[in-house]
Image (tube, coloured by chain):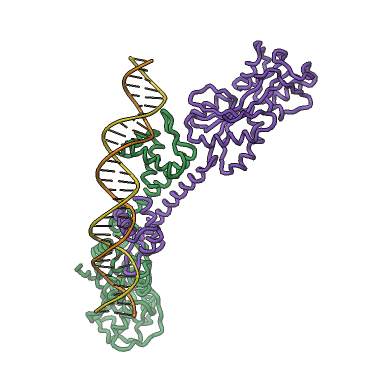
Chain colours: A purple, B green, C yellow, D orange
Amino acid sequence: MTLTELRYLVALADQRHFGRAAEFCNVSQPTLSTQIRKLEDYLGIALFERGNRSVVPTPVGERVIAEARHVLNGASRLRDIAGAARSVLAGPLSLGIIPTLSPYLLPWLLSPLRAAFPALELNLVEDQTAVLLRALSDYELDAALLALPVDAPDIEQQPLFDETFYLACPADHPLAHRDRVRMTEIETASLMLLSEGHCLRDQAIALCSQPLIDPGFRTASLTTLRHLVAAGYGCTLLPALAGAAETDARITLVPLAENNARRRIGLVWRRGSPRRTDFDALAALIRKQAPAPVTVVPAN
Amino acid sequence: MTLTELRYLVALADQRHFGRAAEFCNVSQPTLSTQIRKLEDYLGIALFERGNRSVVPTPVGERVIAEARHVLNGASRLRDIAGAARSVLAGPLSLGIIPTLSPYLLPWLLSPLRAAFPALELNLVEDQTAVLLRALSDYELDAALLALPVDAPDIEQQPLFDETFYLACPADHPLAHRDRVRMTEIETASLMLLSEGHCLRDQAIALCSQPLIDPGFRTASLTTLRHLVAAGYGCTLLPALAGAAETDARITLVPLAENNARRRIGLVWRRGSPRRTDFDALAALIRKQAPAPVTVVPAN
DNA sequence: TGCCGCGATAGAGGCAGGCTATTGTGAACG
DNA sequence: CGTTCACAATAGCCTGCCTCTATCGCGGCA
């Protein structure tokens, strides 16, 4: 039993005439006759009653024809599903994104993305780098936006933009009036960071030449940190995008003097993923839409 | 796109291994590889992501696979429909039957029929001969039980049994004590018949040598006629099966002397109908189950 | 009775789907 | 660090079937 036979079957049921059904199917009349007969032999029942001037489905034939229509509709839907996903960035795509980037990147990304690729069905997963990489290798994610470099096997990446860090301190803080500060000038005791697992925390610790004296804070979002700074509990480091969004009259942002006080955001995916063109298109759009606070890394 | 390709697709989705999927499908691994690749080319999308040790469906692949399962289920149902109808007297069958036979034949026919052919889905249509023949030629019926002979083109028939007629008269009627009566002895003025269109009426009129004086009765059922006879309004003719069922203490049944005072019941169907074996089986069962009042016509 | 419409059959050809054998490529292991 | 193993892809070939054109058979109709 083949889909072609079922197409012939339905055509004959509609046309009730071998010649017209064959014409409808763009085949010759003997071809259609033979295939219908073959289908009847295969099923072991008569599907049509051939009269002298008539071709009429048998009662079982009617049921078989109804089911055949059902099958053909399914095949058509299958083609539609594939067709809708054929073009670039269409159909389902699971994208991971780190929490220190998500709330500040998505507002200016989502609208252009929807405008450029309306058929894209984005499934966003916000979590820490390690979790995202795990999900990526487990095929739960197709790609992820996170801070480079990533240390994982079988991962390909494409850098997108650089984001400098700012010291966020209370407006009455001793360093608040400075044009720029060095990391060594910051009292590590007053530096508040995100809880463990956030790559931003790890990077901030790496930037501190002195060992960090933990103040006991364990915060899960930069917004919470901002409130803590505004209330005078201490300082923190904010990436450029977050700093531009988390504004507060009681907070001053001071650029850091160190050249490496920044992070590079990139798109990563499994090596050999068949959606490479999708990822290229996504990367291109992110680069194009990148707002002022960040520095776009030119495509290689 | 073929059903075979879809089978390979779901097998690979289930097994996640080309070799095992090929074994499951009873084909070689290269065959399955090629067909999967062909399907991907046809659909224009990647259905699986081939890793070094892994074969994982892409997100669109998952959807396509789900739809493929759906299509294959439909194809399987289609085979089941055909398979259920493959045996004799199984599946749907529309059977016409005339009103003067239906209430008296069905009681002893239906139970054995169900017992012998439990898969038969009988769709009974009770109407007059002309209507049944029309429905038959319009493919609304598959066969019909009615009085022979039938005068219609492209109709094949098989006689089943003969049914003698009885004069049904009030117990105090002058003819009620007779062993047998001739049609000529019956006062045509007191003879009540069914309304026009019933073959039994036509046959009764044909049996009367004298022209019938219409008493003005137009009854649609033999049961009504029985009540009229019991109330003394006149006499009527009842076929044997009806006479055996429509008993009443105030009614006497007298056999008719004429040899042709009987009707022959037969099964008729369109010439060339593919369900000939079904009809033969049905006819054989009716002959076997025929009760005493009728005389079975031997099969030719 | 001859023509016409329509479906079935015959025979030929070309493509597709199947096979075996082999290659390429990571991964595991001594 | 080379070898081997596992596994999918590729090559090349063959068979079967799907399709075609040509023709036949059969009723209906003029």
Name the residue located 42 percent from the left edge and 28 percent from the top edge. Answer: B52
**Who is closer to the viewer here, B283 or A43?**
A43
Q: Position of residue D25 (x, y in %)?
A: 24, 67
Name the residue located 48 percent from the left edge and 29 percent from the top edge. Answer: A271
B276 to the left or right of B190: left
Give above or below for A66 relative to C22: below
* Numbered marks: total: 0
A127 to the left or right of B175: right
* Quarter of the figure with residue A254: top right
Name the residue located 61 percent from the left edge and 29 percent from the top edge. Answer: A298
**Who is closer to the viewer here, B249 or A270?**
A270
Give above or below for A125 relative to B235: above
* Quarter of the figure with residue B67: top left
* Quarter of the figure with residue A187: top right
Is residue B289 in view? no
Q: Position of residue D14 (x, y in %)?
A: 25, 43
A148 to the left or right of C23: right
Instruction: Classify the position of the C terminus of chain B by image quarter.
Output: bottom left
Give above or below for A110 relative to A169: below
Q: Position of residue D24 (x, y in %)?
A: 23, 66
Name the residue located 39 percent from the left edge and 79 percent from the top edge. Answer: B195
Is residue B283 in view? yes
**Who is closer to the viewer here, A211 or A109?**
A109
Q: Position of residue A240 (x, y in %)?
A: 69, 26
